[in-house]
Amino acid sequence: MNPELDKLHPYPFEKLSALFADSRPPSDLRHIALSIGEPKHPTPALITEAMIKHIDGLSVYPTTAGIPALRKTIADWLDQRFQLAGNINAETQILPVNGTREALFAFAQAIIDRKQDPLVVMPNPFYQIYEGAALLAGAQMHLLNCDAENDFMPDFDNVPSSVWTQCQLLYLCSPGNPSGAVIDAETLSKLIQLAHEYNFIIAADECYSEIYFEETLPPAGLLQAAVAAGYNDFSRCVVFHSLSKRSNAPGLRSGFVAGDAAVLKTFLRYRTYHGCAMPTATQAASIAAWSDENHVVQNRRLYREKFTAVLDILKPVMNVSQPEASFYLWAETPIADTEFAKKLYEQWHVTVLPGSYLARDTKQGNPGLNRVRMALVAPLDECVEAARRIRQLIESLS
């Protein structure tokens, strides 16, 4: 067996199951899950219709690089959404992937050089795939705590040059999971300059980029910052996007990777052996999704309604505020996060994810302690009911 497997931590939801192992929630209350970031809004009909229409594509092997029409559609979407001034090349700078999760993991396996004592830099808290990818690629991790004092952003300015010198890969997540914090374009440009100075690659997880609250103020992206900084070839920059959150299609397992052509050429070679080509019916459904913005605007409207209603209930009793983007609330708890989550489940049949399960201990502490992540993915009435139960728990504690 691969000895690196022993370094992997239990997944957060495995820890949550263990926390609740001896709990018996009230049977007269329906269970409301705010713990898993799985969108529950209806998948748009245009996606399912395109999938059904092209189901005969199951009779052929798909290519790893994907069909030209999909890559062209993605290039057009990127160009318009992130103002790339026509610099993205559909043939050499885009690869379709089966969701960002598998691509974020595979990417580290393809680019990390184990012989060079590699270091992977990432935010803390983080999407646990980053950690698993780094460890199984034979790298060490350098965690950048994201706490309230720094608006839940990594403090890039205080990263020592010795860390950047050893860094081979920097994982970014903007909008962030779990905080929803957004890295601004100026900071992204500085990071791109650092990547060129110290010879590392930036992998930007932007899967929440289309869930934001001001229609005229979408979050900046890494490729957008690259063009603004004069890196029109997107050198050392790779972004990861998905239809799971944007289009409420987590079961479609469809996304893409885009950026540096030289890096993607190597990644394509890896993926050819990896055996992860996207079925052609899925590609047809993806073309339909990336070609339409109306359903995405509607999606944001539904999330705005939920955030407004839930925050009206919780803000009087809890330190919580609307994030810049994403569908998460990153709320401070009046007691230990694990104790809070357990009481909420046992007394009110609501599940939230303890923040400490999403972070790791560092010399500066665990930035997830005394926080919980709430995913406002359930229908509006369930989110409102969950907020009322959470408020009742907090009022009972005080």
Image (cartoon, rainbow, N blue to C red):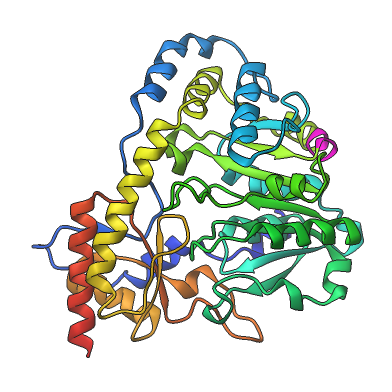
Q: Quarter of the image holding residue 88?
A: top right
The secondary structure making up most of the magenta span is helix
Q: Quarter of the image holding residue 352?
A: bottom left
Please state the horizontal and vertical placement of residue 130, each as a whole percent of the image.
64, 57
Q: Is residue 72 above or below residue 349?
A: above
Give me the residue at 48% from left, 9% from top. 56
Please state the horizontal and vertical placement of residue 232, each as a whole percent of the image.
81, 40
Which quadrant of the figure contains the C terminus? Answer: bottom left
Residues in magenta?
Answer: 261-266
Side (left or right) of 174 relative to 267: left
Side (left or right) of 3 relative to 290: right
Q: Is residue 14 magenta?
A: no
Q: Is residue 109 visible?
A: no
Q: Is residue 10 above or below residue 63?
A: below
Give whichever of 55, 292 is nearer the camera: 292
Give me the residue at 50% from left, 35% from top. 253
Please state the horizontal and vertical placement of residue 166, each as a whole percent of the image.
87, 67
Give me the residue at 46% from left, 41% from top. 246
Q: How many numbered marks does the figure carry?
A: 0
Please state the horizontal and vertical placement of residue 74, each as a whole percent of the image.
61, 29
